[in-house]
Image (cartoon, helix red, strand yellow):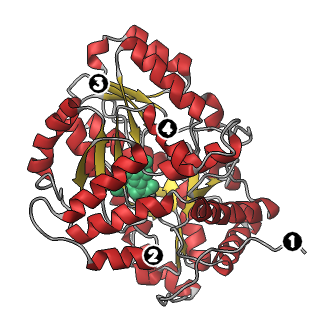
Amino acid sequence: MKLPFAEEYRIKMVEPIRKSTKEERLKWIKEAKYNLFNLKSEHVYIDLLTDSGTGAMSDKQWAEMMLGDESYAGSSSYYKMKKAINEITGFEYFLPTHQGRAAENVLFSATVKEGDIVPGNSHFDTTKGHIEIRKAHAIDCTIDEAFNTSIKHDFKGNVDLEKLEKVLKTNDISKIPFIIVTVTCNTAGGQPVSMKNLKEVKELADKYGVKVIFDSARFAENAYFIKMREEGYADKTIREIVREMFSYADGMTMSSKKDAIVNIGGFIATRHKKMFDEAAVFNILYEGYLTYGGLAGRDMNALAQGLYEATEFSYLENRIGQVAYLGKKLVEYGVPVQQPFGGHAIFVDALKFLPNVKREEFPAQTLAVEVYTEAGVRGVEIGAILADRDPVTHENRYPELELLRLALPRRTYTYNHIDYIAAALKNVYDRREEITKGLKITHEAPVLRHFTVELDRV
Ligand code: P71
């Protein structure tokens, strides 16, 4: 008999999580104003809100925590992180930051000005927020296939080169500080970008003299997909693939809460001293001195170790395999999900799942509330609430897709948990016809409204 797939780790510490009753959950979600960010985590049984900062660190990472050097300047932890980043990405210069959006804030403070244009594949919402708050514009040049959940395409995160060239050709090039490519593309559903596409984006950028930045939160997951799907990469190691990916970038921002498997941390890295010097000024202003940037020495140690672990094939095979297992179960149950499955999450197509809920009544948020009340499983809306209002017209923006994202924390839940999650979705799916009314907004913030929005049932 062929031996089945199994994890290359065992569990040495456990954290209790508690189930609740449907009555309790109905009360809690009402008190939370139907915003799942407002729920107490103890009221959630399985938390799929995000894969960010929620992973389980390894024994080696915890050991590294004990070895952290807490010196204000020049700590060994800083140099450990610098070495790991250099070995894995090839970038010479780096700035630690407390998380991904801090890296965006620092880098964009040095590079993005009012009226600028930042094209890329679908920008993540904090990235877009940091562009738009500077009165600059994020232009989405993702391939059209990304927005049709029934089309199969191996690299739905790819940049449409024609769309990109049009932006480069028709705008004053001095107004384009860089192109940003998000690997994997979270907003397109955790979808990878092919090596070929990364290379072509770089060639196009070079032709117009524009820099390329990778938003690299899930760079290792992207490398895994390249290895598994792209011709010529099957025999390369993840580290070799990662090195080649970053060879097509001038710099990167990183939320280390994802593919460095730490609970907090981020960084900027670049091959250009000038970019480093300009960003360094803002790092000191916003984050902290250059050799800690808002992190403790122990955080930098765990982060460095996490970068090595996340770029091991067996880790990624297990990680992405677990996400795919959930996806396959849902497909088996007839639940409409985005395909191919993303690296960090399964995205449920809420427009297909709840056809009776109007777009103005936020189908994906409605589905998130239903799944929570059904089973205590917390996902997150990736739809009109997240898309926010147009900064100029203040009209609601309706993205092409209304998705419920079920993001799996790294090395955290078991296959039994996955079966439970899938059953929860199936139960809601079985009674989908009865769900006809959605939600309405009663309060919202001017930017990044999804975190604090308050809603009520229609
Ligand atoms: C995710 C997050 C974290 C999050 C953010 C907003 C709402 C809910 C959860 C964060 C990312 C990301 C990419 C591609 C930059 C950031 C910001 N993602 N780029 O997906 O996915 O990083 O959270 O460390 O500041 O749940 P940060």
Neighbourhood count class around disc 3 (C-alpha, 10 Å): few under 14, some 14–19, many 20 upward: many
State the residue position of label 4. Answer: 245
Q: Check the image and report above or below for 336 versus 33.
A: above
- Given the current orientation, which residue lies at the most extreme right position? 1
Amino acid, disc 3 = Pro
Neighbourhood count class around disc 1 (C-alpha, 10 Å): few under 14, some 14–19, many 20 upward: few
Is tag 3's residue or tag 2's residue first in the polypeptide sequence?
2
Secondary structure of the residue carrying tag 1 is loop
State the residue position of label 3. Answer: 177
Q: Check the image and report above or below for 162 versus 114.
A: above
Between 87 and 277, the one lying in front of the other is 87
Q: CA distance from mark 3 to mark 1?
A: 53 Å
Where does residue 274 sit, x and y in percent of width and height? Answer: 19, 30
Amino acid, disc 2 = Ser
Q: Is residue 99 visible?
A: no
State the residue position of label 2. Answer: 58
Tell me if 70 is positioned left or right of 329 in this view. left
Q: Is residue 197 visible?
A: yes
Amino acid, disc 4 = Met
Instruction: Mark 4 vs mark 3: give the one in front.
Output: 4
Q: CA distance from mark 2 to mark 1?
A: 29 Å
